[in-house]
Image (cartoon, coloured by chain):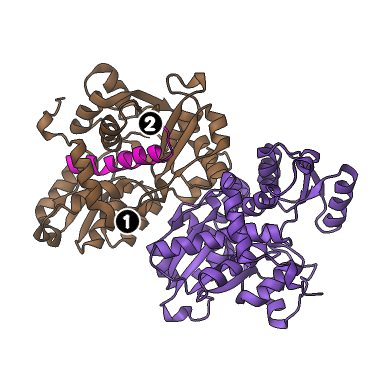
Chain colours: A purple, B brown
Amino acid sequence: MDIAPDAALPTAADIAAAAGRIGDFAKVTPVLRSDALDARAGARLLIKAEVLQRTGSFKIRGAANHITQLSRAALDRGVLAYSSGNHAQAVACAAARVGSPAVIVMPADAPRIKIARTRGFGAEVVLYDRYTENREALGARIAAERGLTLIPPYDHPWTIAGGGTLGLELAGQAAELGVVLDALVVCCGGGGLIAGCGLAMAERSPATRVYAVEPAGFDDTARSLAAGERQAVDPAARSICDALLSPSPGELTFALNRRHLAGGLTVTDAEAADAMRAAFAELKLVVEPGGAVALAAALNRRLPGQADGDLTVGVVLTGGNVDPSLYAEVLTAAL
Amino acid sequence: MDIAPDAALPTAADIAAAAGRIGDFAKVTPVLRSDALDARAGARLLIKAEVLQRTGSFKIRGAANHITQLSRAALDRGVLAYSSGNHAQAVACAAARVGSPAVIVMPADAPRIKIARTRGFGAEVVLYDRYTENREALGARIAAERGLTLIPPYDHPWTIAGGGTLGLELAGQAAELGVVLDALVVCCGGGGLIAGCGLAMAERSPATRVYAVEPAGFDDTARSLAAGERQAVDPAARSICDALLSPSPGELTFALNRRHLAGGLTVTDAEAADAMRAAFAELKLVVEPGGAVALAAALNRRLPGQADGDLTVGVVLTGGNVDPSLYAEVLTAAL
């Protein structure tokens, strides 16, 4: 697998430009503190509550940065996305706000709440089998047939720059609080959000070490960082973290991540579920499994240097779109 | 039942003074918006996410305003509170922050999460039977024996002024957003929070009509407002809204509420549970039953004039301390 040339990669200036574009679509989400979680982590946690973002996840940032750069003619023809559910809602929401038809290709086993909310934004949802069908091929065919513009979920400079606005925002919020983040933990599927955040931190907070957090079995970015080239996930791997099941790092995202990340951390599904319960009890926030892995890493003291008890750590809670039935199982410790 | 004399009542100036005192204890909580909830309510909702407050409810505002006005000698002897759980945590938390021992008298059937979190702040918890024992008498006896200062849950000018800081804060946030609240809905147990909020709105946003929202069977404030004098709850009444089970309006709180409130609204337990599910799905916030009744009133279009679809309504989500088992039942629609 290749490394993308520098010319194709987004820059810190692209993130600043994205922040200027997405203001009508995305909200500034708050940073929360919790003495109880700090005690569990042995660290000062600055918790970026991105579950409070419009559509319930960070994905609106990248989708809005993409859609606002399309021509009116392209918007009138429509847009297409493939997504496990959060990018789906984000593209559907952003497209609806600019009057563009949206077709979303989603796995048939995506959380029902994600499928329902995507349809709720007015999008046409096309379902496929996550384990036997190729969503890229399916999406490309529909897009070609209907003249739709593809909005990629992570491996595109506009998507990455949009996600990077979260890092830019958090760096500013940390500065307002008068602290420097020693570390930032961000969940990682295809690696778009963390690629943008790593880029933002390199520019705005270069002392901050940025770590990707992945579910066990889906540690392709951690292994790729260690190997120096992109590694794939074992197709037999399974996880409750439905938002983080990408088969390999993206080309652009890995090119950025190998440059900016301090490493990759891994948590089990049980640890992710425990972090969901901690967010319920201490933060009163609903966090989906994939959105809780960064908190899980912090609570389980996985960061280098965390045992010393002196770190200030940014933790991103990326999304809260979880089916009530699964959430109830997690709360009652059945998972 | 008597009406308190004006001299005993807190003023808008007391609320402003409270806001200056509680800054080290309480946070400024965000105002959230949701297109989906606006559509359900047929109104523009400004949702005050007080579940994100320290201790998970608004009660820290009153507890901090009280404790910061005690002498060091009184703090060294200690404080006592009786509470169904949110005031308990608030007093325990505020006392711990100033190094004051705290004894909390709680009903034995309070949510386990509330008892556990109160103990977690280092307080001594004394349990009593909600339906056969008199918590005021029990608390007074322990306070007298140990020289403790009682921190009343609602019927005290310092508690009311502390709660009023929420209204003051919300009025400022609405002004920042460039809107005037046509109405404000606040849950009501003993009536302390809404008494403070009504006072704050009368001063800062006099066009805002303030409504108390109570669970069915616990509509003592609604009936008292209609009757012009304090009415009691039927002792046989039951509700899942454990935070709102006060037997009658307070003396001070009712004296303020009869002056400032536009009326009382009532919702069923099923409507409160449905509002909890709406907050889960659309806001990603964990809201306890009593904390959800104001949202329930708005979603069920109970406000006068709401049918016209043109109201801007402040909705306070007061607390999020709910047992995981009950929350799981609510999510799976068993309640």
Region rendered in magenta: B156-179
Which residue is painted at 50% across and 40% down in the image? Answer: B33
Question: What's the mark number on residue B69?
Answer: none
Classify the position of the C terminus of chain A by image quarter: bottom right
Q: In terms of secondary structure, where does tag 1 sit?
A: helix
Q: The numbered mark 1 sits on a residue in which chain?
A: B
- Is residue B308 within the magenta segment? no
- For the residues tagged 1 and 2, is the chain the same? yes
Q: Name the amino acid, label 1.
A: Thr
Residue at the outermost top position: B227
Which residue is painted at 36% across and 47% down in the image? Answer: B57
Residue tagged 2: B184
Residue tagged 1: B118
Q: Is residue A290 left or right of residue B210?
A: right
Vertical relation: B251 (above or below) A242: above
| Image coords of residue B110 (percent x, y) | 36, 47
Vertical relation: B79 (above or below) B224: below
